[in-house]
Image (cartoon, rainbow, N blue to C red):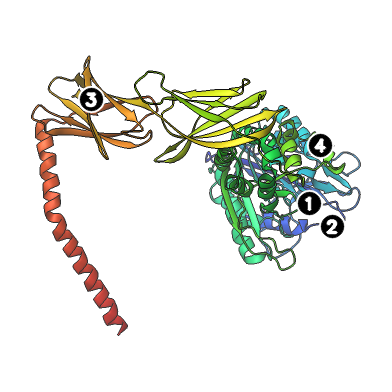
Amino acid sequence: MLGTAGRSSGADTSWTVMVYMANDSTSPLPSGDNINAMEAAQQAPGTSILVLLDEPGEGNSRILDVQHDPNPDQMTIVSTTVDDNDEVIGPSGEVNTGDATTLANFIKFSTSHWPADRYVLILWGHGAGWDGLCLDGIDMLTLVELKEGLSDARSTLGRSLDMIAVDACVEATFETLYQVRACADYFVAAQTNIPYQGFPYYQILTALEEAPNQEPAAFGGVIVDEYIAWSAVNSQNSATLAVFDLAEIASVINALIKLSEQGLRYDSIFHSSIHTAMASAECYDAEWTFDIGDFLVRLSGSDVPLEMKALATDVFVAYSKMVTRFDKFDHPDPLDGINVTGATGAIIYAPSTSLFDTRYLDLDLSTTNWDEFGKSARLVAQTNESEVGPVIYYGDSDSDGKMDLAALAWSNPYPNVTAWVFRDSPHGMTYVKTYESDASSITISGIAGDLIVSASASVNGSAVSYSELSITLHGASTIEVQLLLDGTSVSEGYDVRVVSTNLTDYAEAVSGKFYARLAVPTQVAVGQLVQIEVLNEAGVIVSTSHAFVPDDHATVDIEILHEEIQQQTDFYVLLLFSILPGLFVLAFSIMMYVDFKKKQRAA
């Protein structure tokens, strides 16, 4: 008996939800309760729910086409058993859910016989983080096999699944996310343990029935909301759940690679700080399996080089874009004592050099340098003293009496020296540029302002010297102003001036445009907000605008108001200021009256 799901006559979005229910283990989970919860929920036209159920024992595997049970109090499964013609289960009547082929065949069978607009796969069972999930006896679906099965199904389906949700413990790992990145658009999982009862399927599927046209990301958010709300009432443990946009993971990994590179480079002289940030990050399931966001926050706030702090922030920003929905319920069980106060959605493992962790090398994440960084950081190792840093020599390249370049010179010959330049701006410290040399010297030029330089020297890829230097270099920043009247460029009869604290500087008119050349940092700082004023021949301001002082050059277009509009605007401004005192008095009187009435009622 095969299904024919597709678009309904009402043109609602159709869904095929595939539940890969791996329950053939020595610690079975309440599969019957979960299926009954699925049956209790109504299904929208065009929505199909298929369950591959593998219970303890031999020859009892089956595929169920979930049907609505109008009597939710009875615990008998009323769903239809599907004859799969040996496409999934085979003549033996038994499947191994720890086998990639079983997963691939179930997805291909479900999507071919129950075609739909949206495909959701739920991986149900026991989870072991980066080691695998969906236990069958002593076999487990490793992450390598998970990718293999999903990739096989994807090639047949011709596209990725819309969403994978994991009703199993601790599978919101970076290792899992990166492994399945090409096989689904969204991924829903918990970084902590899932309660014995699993997801609240009645609430989740009812929400899908009520809004079948919702996007997969929104449906993922529904799963998160319903699960956390259910956990707050029914679970004795802390709970977390997140939705991940797998299209964003490439950006996260690229940023993580850059951070890991610097972490490996600086480990010799900053090992203690890196190790402490990693060791103190919030952990849930196992030692050295920690919340990635909490680690990044701790690292960026620790005593590490500025570039590592900046790169940790870059990873966190990219990671935050990947997490489209996250919620948690902090209720530590007296036995496990697990808090999730620092949880942000996903965990990551820092592998060791043990024989057990050699399997980590099979994962896609090990093709990056994260595993090497993790191994190095988790070791208890000595932190070396930094060797002598560079001497600073200032220079004036244009002979105007202002220092506009700085040369950093190391006394020892090093095969590699690096300088990361940051600017102390009104918006905080911002990254500007990186210099690198093999000549034990670096010249910084073309950058103006109050600068912080993170300077280091390396031997065989490992930093042996680090210095944080403060320098001030002088330069100019130009703001180009184009005046427009009714969309036409004008310049005659107008002046332009730039105004900020302790600055009033008139722009120079050249070929129909105005150029304000500002001295940095004596007049202004890069990133500072300045006001640009347009004056007519009588010296009256006819238009204003604002701009941030650029590194080098910026262009601003300013529309000049007609005189009658300007006068009308001035009139309303004067009128506003004339009535404001009265409004304040009125508001204060109303406030006092309301307060009086409250006290009167209380009395």
Query: What quarter of the picture does the C terminus occupy?
Result: bottom left
CB within 8 Å, label 4 to label 2: no
Question: Mark 4 = which residue?
Answer: 100
Q: Amino acid at mark 2?
A: Ser
Q: Residues within 10 Å of mark 2 (few under 14, many from 20)?
A: few
Q: Nearer the viewer, residue 149 or 157?
A: 149
Question: Residue beneath label 2, please?
Answer: 27
Q: SS for tag 2? A: loop
Compare marks 4 and 2 and give the one earlier in the sequence.
Answer: 2
Question: Does residue 118 sit above or below 169 in this rendering?
Answer: above
Labels 4, 3: front one: 3
Q: Nearer the viewer, mark 2 or mark 3?
A: 3
Residue 321, quarter of the rendered image: top right
Could you tell me if residue 88 is visible in this image?
Answer: no
- Residue type at numbered disc 1: His
Q: Position of residue 87 (x, y in %)?
A: 82, 35
Is disc 1 placed on a helix, strand or loop? loop
Give the CA separation, mark 1 to mark 4: 16 Å
**What residue would you read off at disc 1?**
126
- For label 3, the residue is 507
Report the Cα–Cα distance between label 2 and label 1: 9 Å
- Residue flagged by tag 4: what amino acid is it? Ala
Give the mark, 1 or 4, whose residue is nearer the N terminus.
4
